[in-house]
Image (cartoon, rainbow, N blue to C red):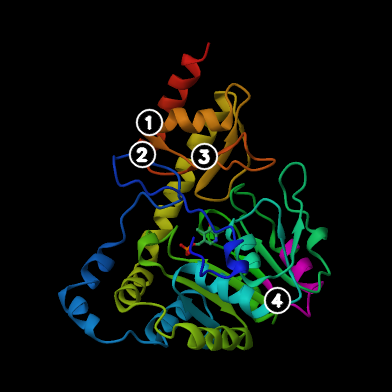
Amino acid sequence: MSKFLSEKLSALKEYTPGEQPQDKKYIKLNTNESPFPPSQGVIDGVNGKKVADLRLYSDPECKLLKEQLATVYSTTPDRVFLSNGSDEVLNFAFMAYGSNGVAFADITYGFYSVFCDLYGLKADVVRLNEDFSLNVDGFCGKNKLVVIANPNAPTGMDIPLSDVEKILQSNSKNVVVIDEAYVDFGGTSAVELTKKYKNLLCVQTFSKSRSMAGARLGFAIADKEIIADLEKIKYSTNPYNVNSLTQVAGLCALKENDYYMQNAKRIIQNREWTNDQLLSLGFEVLPSKANFIFAKTDKISGKDLYIKLKEKGVLVRHFDKPRISEFNRITVGSLEQMQVFIEKVKEILGELK
Ligand SMILES: *Cc1c(COP(=O)(O)O)cnc(C)c1O
C-alpha cells in the first residue's frame, strides 16, 4: 500500500475472490461457475464483426438487452437495469441507499460488509439462527437498507416469498435488496413482487446459471423510480458499464434461455446426487437451493479437507470465519466432476488414522 492512499481506504479490508489458479488444471468447484459452456448462439454471436465494432462505444442504454430481459421476466424495459456483473449493481445500491446503515446477515455474501466499509456505512449484522436459517423477524422494521441473498451464500438456504413480503411490508420506507444470484437453481424469485412493492430491488446475474461469469453481466428489476436512481449513479460513474461484446452475449443467451434453464435442472440433479453421497459418508449438509453445497464432517476439519482436496486436484472454497470454519462450500459441477470429488473425499477419509 502506498503512502498516498487515504487513511480510510488504507483501513479497508477488501473482498477476497475465490482462487482462479492459472498454474495447473483443477476440478474447479470453488467459485460457483457453471460447468457448461455458453449456448451456441452466444459463441456465434460474439463474431468477427462484433469484435471489429469494439472501436465504437457500447450502447449506454443497453436497449436491446433491457427489452429482451423485460420479455423473459414479464416486465417493462424501464424496470430493468444492466450492470457490470451484479457486484456493480450491489455497489450502486449501497452507495445510493445505505446512508442510514445497512442490515445484512452475519453469514452471507462477503461483499456486503466490504461495501459498508468502503462507503463508511453502519453495518447492522443480523445473526442467522442456529440452524443457519434467516432470522426473518430480525430484518423487519429496520428503517435502513436491507440486503438479503436468497438463496443465501454460502449456506444455500432460502426463504419463501411470504417471508420476503413480510420484510418488504415492514420496511416500506427503505429499500430491500434481494440478491438472487442463485435463484435459478430451485429458489423462488421475488421479481413478480417488484410490481407490488416500490421498495423492492431484485438483483440477478449471468455469472452462475447462464455460464457467463467472465463476461461480467448482472441486472436488476425494480420499480422505475429505483431504476432511475441506479441509472443516475451509473451515468455519474461509468455510462458504458456493460461492454459491447457482453451486451451481444447476454442478448444471445436470453434468446436461448431454455438451454440455461435445462442446465440448471441438471445442476439440481447433480446437487441432489452429491448431497446423498455426502450424507452417506457421514457429512452434515445444509439444505441447498443453489449450485453449491455447504457441508462439514467431524472426521476432519474444514481447513484440512480443503487442503487435502486441493492436493488431489479438487478446488473447493473454505472460509476461515466464525461459525462456518468447519464447513466447505462445494460448487456443483458436472456429474463426472462430482464423482471425482466424492472419490477424493472417500480417499481422504480412508487415509485418516
Ligand atoms: C456470485 C455472486 C454475486 C456476484 O456475481 P457477479 O459475477 O458480480 O454477477 C452476487 N451475489 C452473490 C450472493 C453471489 O454469490
Q: In the image, which residues are magenta?
A: 163-176
Residue 220 % position (x, y): 54, 75
Which badge, 3 or 2, is on the more N-terminal residue?
Answer: 2
* Inter-mark Cα distance, 1 to 4: 44 Å
Which badge, 1 or 4, is on the more N-terminal residue?
Answer: 4
Mark 2: which amino acid? Answer: Ile
Which badge, 2 or 1, is on the more N-terminal residue?
Answer: 2
Q: Residue furthest front?
A: 3
* Residue behind mark 1: 340
Mark 4 neighbour density, 10 Å: few (under 14) some (14–19) many (20 or more): many
* Inter-mark Cα distance, 2 to 1: 8 Å
Residue 93 % position (x, y): 61, 75
Rendered residue at 40%/87% (across/down): 60
Q: Quadrant of residue 200?
A: bottom right
Q: Quadrant of residue 299?
A: top right
312 with respect to 91 (left or right): left
137 with respect to 89 (left or right): right
Whether label 2 touches label 1, CB < 8 Å = yes
Which badge, 4 or 3, is on the more N-terminal residue?
Answer: 4
277 with respect to 193 (left or right): left
Nearer the observer: mark 2 or 1; the answer is 2
